[in-house]
Image (cartoon, grey):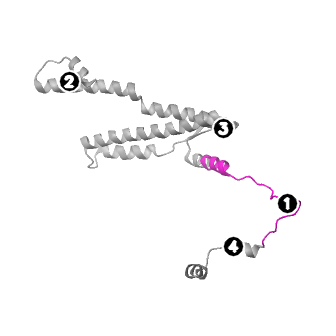
Amino acid sequence: MVQESWSNNQVRGLGGFFLKEKIIGIKATLKVWNKDHFGDSQQKLATIEKELNKLEAKGDVRQLSAQELLCRKKHQEELWSAAQSHKSLLRQKARSRWIKEGDSNSKFFHRVVNLDCRSNSLRGVFVNGVWIDEPGRVKEEIHLFFKNRFKEEEWVRPKLDGVSFKVIGQQYNDRLTGPFTEKEIKDAVWE
């Protein structure tokens, strides 16, 4: 492909200009090949996330089938792989810019740092189809989401043939759940 691009690109001029134009032609060809072969990594990430979110939404409403569970697992693996590839690509681009422009507190350096901060921040969330971007409400909604997601449901203690299990007293419970004393630790280590 490189040889083909080199030979197909007809340039006239002196040595330096000729070489520069040939390299620019190869660069354009490689960009097209990269886009065709690997695709847009950002778009690929968004597509996989969208599919995964659809399956997650189905899982919230009903039990997923075995096929859907396999599909979800496949999408999760693809998402991780695509995210790693995209991250690697961004790191390579930043590194090449850093080599070109340097890091002596330049405008570029500050842009890269600020971009990292922006990409690691959460600007807002959708709740019941409404976009919320007020920081206090965003924190509250995230807290509520995870609180509901991981809360344990109350359940009645099981009984065997109508006989209740024995329950320990509060004093013994406090002793079991309380912090270890220095004497208990020494006894456990040295005995």
Q: Is residue 143 placed above or below 12 in the rendered structure? A: below
Q: Which residue is mark 4?
A: 176
* Circle 1/circle 4 CB separation < 8 Å: no
Which quadrant of the structure image shows residue 76? top right
Q: Specify whether residue 159 is painted magenta.
A: yes
How far from the left and from the top, in percent, is residue 109? 31, 46
Query: What label sits on residue 22 in the rendered view?
Result: 2
- Say whether disc 2 or disc 4 marks the residue closer to the N-terminus: 2
Which quadrant is the N terminus positioned in? top left
Q: Amino acid at mark 2?
A: Lys
Q: Nearer the viewer, mark 1 or mark 2?
A: 1
Q: Residues within 10 Å of mark 1 (few under 14, many from 20)?
A: few
Q: Can residue 129 be seen?
A: no
Q: Amino acid at mark 4?
A: Leu
Q: Residues within 10 Å of mark 4 (few under 14, many from 20)?
A: few
* Circle 1/circle 2 CB separation < 8 Å: no
Q: Nearer the viewer, mark 1 or mark 4?
A: 1
Q: Residues within 10 Å of mark 3 (few under 14, many from 20)?
A: some
Principal secondary structure, stretch drawn in magenta: loop
Q: Which residues are magenta?
A: 141-168
**Is residue 106 found left or right of 78 in the rendered image?**
left
Q: Specify whether residue 37 is painted magenta.
A: no
Q: Which residue is mark 3?
A: 59
